[in-house]
Amino acid sequence: MSGNGAVNIAGYLSKIADSFKISADTDGDMIMLSGDSSLDIHRSKTVISALLASSETEDISPFMVDYLVALARQGKIDEFMNVKDEIFYITPTGNKITARTLGQKFYIDALERYPLVLASGPAGCGKTFLGVACAVKALKSRQVSRIILTRPAIEAGERLGFLPGDIEEKVDPYMRPIYDALQILLGREGFDRYYEKGIIEVSPLAFMRGRNLDDSFVLLDEAQNTTPEQMKMFLTRLGINCKACVAGDFTQVDLPKGGISGLRDAIRILRGVDDIAIVEMDNSDIVRNSLVKKIVEAYDRDDTKRE
């Protein structure tokens, strides 16, 4: 193989070769692959070709290499390359929001096509940020007239009642990741303006009881920490022209021991129901610091040993 971008990926060749147990050597702008398995040579070639194509428009990262290796084993590199540069949203500062994995692409597509999406996945796969981005996009394109963002008020063993301050001060720590996402997507002034007008509402899940959510995009985040009763209450609030995203991470359930996650229960009950999409991302969709993926995998291995 040859190409002007060969120098840009030279530092990753040994990693790719080790992944497929082949040999990779360079001679100028030539890359030569050899090994006992023609399939593994072909997979390595698809990874290198994808990296060469990507290096023309972006910097190569260890995450990209690892992800392309995983896709090559599944035969899905071409599918990913066809969609990876599709721009989903542009922030006020000009940053382009795109799907960085196929799982993220399926998640975004589901949020745009279905009125209700139930999504699960480990930390770092973009559930909250992309869910908020879809809500902001729907608001700015006038598909809905308001955004409602909510979380159950339980996290790492703490409850709102044990925190000092009034209700706004109690809620703020739980909603900080959502505030951060909104400020990136709308700019600080844009977020403040929408928030002050009540167009964007952020509140604990308990405050949803008794409400009718019409003409809204509603995101229930950290949904793994809902009870089945809370989840049913939330889902039956959905009104006319309402889109809803319910997202959570089953590796970080903070419910009392033995408690059933409302998100897991809802996925079981609603799987196969028309107009409801279920998106299940995995460790390959983690786009945060590469160390996060290693940490999640280490905990998964430990959980397997314990079981």
Image (spheres, rainbow, N blue to C red):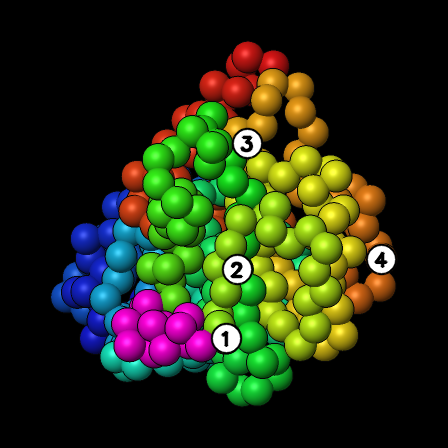
> What SS does tag 2 mark?
strand
Quarter of the image for residue 114 reads bottom right
Q: Residues within 10 Å of mark 2 (few under 14, many from 20)?
A: many
What residue sits 19% from the left and 53% below the top? 11
Q: Which residue is mark 2?
A: 149
The residue mark sitting in front, 4 or 2, is 2
Q: Residues within 10 Å of mark 4 (few under 14, many from 20)?
A: few
Q: Which residue is mark 1?
A: 199
Q: Which numbered disc flags the more N-terminal residue, 4 or 2?
A: 2
| Measured Cα–Cα span from mark 4 to mark 2 | 24 Å
What residue sits 53% from the left and 14% below the top? 305
Residue 12 position within the rendered picture, expressed as x and y whole percent measured from the top left:
25, 52
Q: Which numbered disc flags the more N-terminal residue, 1 or 2?
A: 2
Q: Which residue is mark 4?
A: 273
Q: Amino acid at mark 2?
A: Leu
Q: Amino acid at mark 1?
A: Ile
Question: Is 268 placed left or right of 158 in the picture?
Answer: right
- 45 or 151, which is in the foreground? 151
Q: Are marks 1 and 4 in contact (CB under 8 Å)?
A: no
The residue mark sitting in front, 3 or 1, is 1
Q: Amino acid at mark 4?
A: Val
> What SS does tag 4 mark?
loop
Q: Are marks 4 and 3 in contact (CB under 8 Å)?
A: no
Image quarter hosting the C terminus: top right
Question: Is 94 placed left or right of 209 in the picture?
Answer: left
Q: Which residue is mark 3?
A: 253
**Range of the magenta residues?**
183-197
Q: Which numbered disc flags the more N-terminal residue, 2 or 3?
A: 2
Q: Amino acid at mark 3?
A: Val
Image quarter hosting the N terminus: bottom left
| Measured Cα–Cα span from mark 1 to mark 2 | 11 Å
Residue 87 position within the rendered picture, expressed as x and y whole percent measured from the top left:
43, 79
